[in-house]
Amino acid sequence: MKFFKYIALGSMALSLGVGASSCVDDLDVTPDDPDKKTELTTPEEWYGYFSSLYGNLRYEGGLTPNGVDGGAGTWMRCHWNLQTITADEAIILSKWNDPGYNDLKFNTWMTDNTWMFMAYQREATSAKLCSEFISKIDGAAAAGVDADLIAQMKSEARVLRAYSYYYMIDLFGKGPWITNEAVGVNAPVLERADLFNAVTAELEDVIANGNLVVSTSQTYGRLSKEAAHMLLAKLYLNAEVYAGTPMYDKCAAHCKEILKTTNTLADDYRYLFCADNDRYVGKGQEIIWAIEQDANYMTTWGGTTYLTAGAYIESVPDEVLNRLGALGQTPWTGLKVRPELPQVFDKDGSSRTSDKRYLFYEGEFQEGVENLDDISETSDGFMCVKYTYTNSTDYTNEANIALTNQVCNTDYPLFRLADTYLMLGECQKRGVNDADPGFTYFNKVRDRAGLAPITNPTLDEILNERQRELYWEGHRRSDLIRFGKYTGGTYNWSWKGGIYEGKSIDSYRNLFAIPYQYVSTVGQNPGY
């Protein structure tokens, strides 16, 4: 049975007292229904329990406020919104009046924002689920689970917990440090630098214990040793923001560990974001880790369906939608591209026509997004067609085949090798000698895109390259903060601060507010 089938069955863990609750409440709940299973007795049941930890990245539902459907609360959708809609890559048309969207796209959020609550709730829930699993998994030996597999699953659970804390550090700056000992009691709340130190120490220890499986041997959909290195590299890349001390040398060191087993980019950039991109996930391929999507086993409106159907405009001719792959799904007409994103393809000696990563449909649309109410064929804002419903074998759907599934099968990349290359380039630029040949790797990314090399890129050129390569993958807000261009008025994008021309926003918005539901136990960030 494939891993995603176990994920689909993994919801059984909710009957074992490990369901979602607030971030500091007791998880040990006795089921009211005497027919519910409360003890795992087979290896398959323990594996299903383990799979539910990964399932938290895919499941719909959770704690969603009134008026918000469960699909909106999925991990990918709420975190993507916080990282992308609040920056210069995407904006939501007024047709979508879901609670909280306007606050994000205008950078005016406060403590009651729906998306912030759902993101924080997912992070805290994931940390709790992983900690509960870690505290119980040794009991799997009695059910016949091999000791080596127990050690491996425990290590993966620790990395998954660290991944949740990575977002808590990046987006919110603090939270409850939920460890094995803290399950069932009030966990201590750690401030940003302390939480960063705790998480990086945890990951360093997990990697050192040798129980993580390398990418070439790991099961599809599960974390590899390379993914743990990548998570540490991302944390160290932003260490000056998170903890006040640059750690680019450590970032470079972990990037180089990845290159020992994973060091080849996919031939065609487009195929990393279409329905059969699972062939690039793990196994030493470019996508180091992804949230897998499979319409036959798990359906969600919050995965890449959101980035495909959500980006297509209903007024576009059918032949255009067919060519772009939105066939079984009705276009949602919501997400548009802010003009600063296509404009970055005209910088640093690049051009839109020569860059193979320029995956936007222009049609008769206006580049600027000044009118957020217009959804006509000539409305404002280009369409992003980076994510598709189609396979690489017929990427533009020349066969004009109508798909029957409304849910997209495209996996959502969390970590990619191209990002590793670009991080090495940035580390070298920031003075890390051991990052050499970082510029060579930087230019490998440009070469695949069909662009000429830049011998000694500036920091601005590195930031621009990151946007061209990684747009709509949930990295942009963090990148702008690291480069000092998110708050203040050094760089203003359209609708920043709530006006079309853009304006300066206060520095406290480098962090989101702690949702008011958690303030009594976690506290609040300055400025809110």
Image (tube, grey):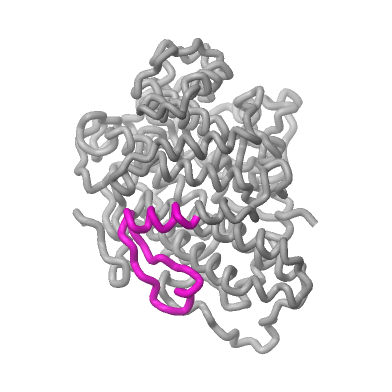
The residue lying toward the viewer, choosing from 249 and 97, is 249
The picture quadrant where one finds residue 387 is top right
- Is 170 inside the magenta-drawn segment? no
Q: Is residue 154 left or right of residue 123?
A: right
* x and y percentages locating residue 452 in the rendered image: 50, 10
346 to 49, vertically: above or below: above
The residue lying toward the viewer, choosing from 275 and 46, is 46
Q: In which quadrant of the rendered image does the C terminus lie?
A: bottom left
Q: Is residue 7 left or right of residue 160?
A: right
* x and y percentages locating residue 114 in the rendered image: 38, 57
141 to 467, vertically: above or below: below
Residue drawn where x is 43% and y is 52% of the image: 167
Residue drawn where x is 43% and y is 63% of the image: 121
* x and y percentages locating residue 120 in the rendered image: 41, 59
Residue 426 in sight from this viewpoint: no
* x and y percentages locating residue 1 in the rendered image: 80, 57
Q: Magenta segment range?
A: 173-202
Residue drawn where x is 50% and y is 77% of the image: 27
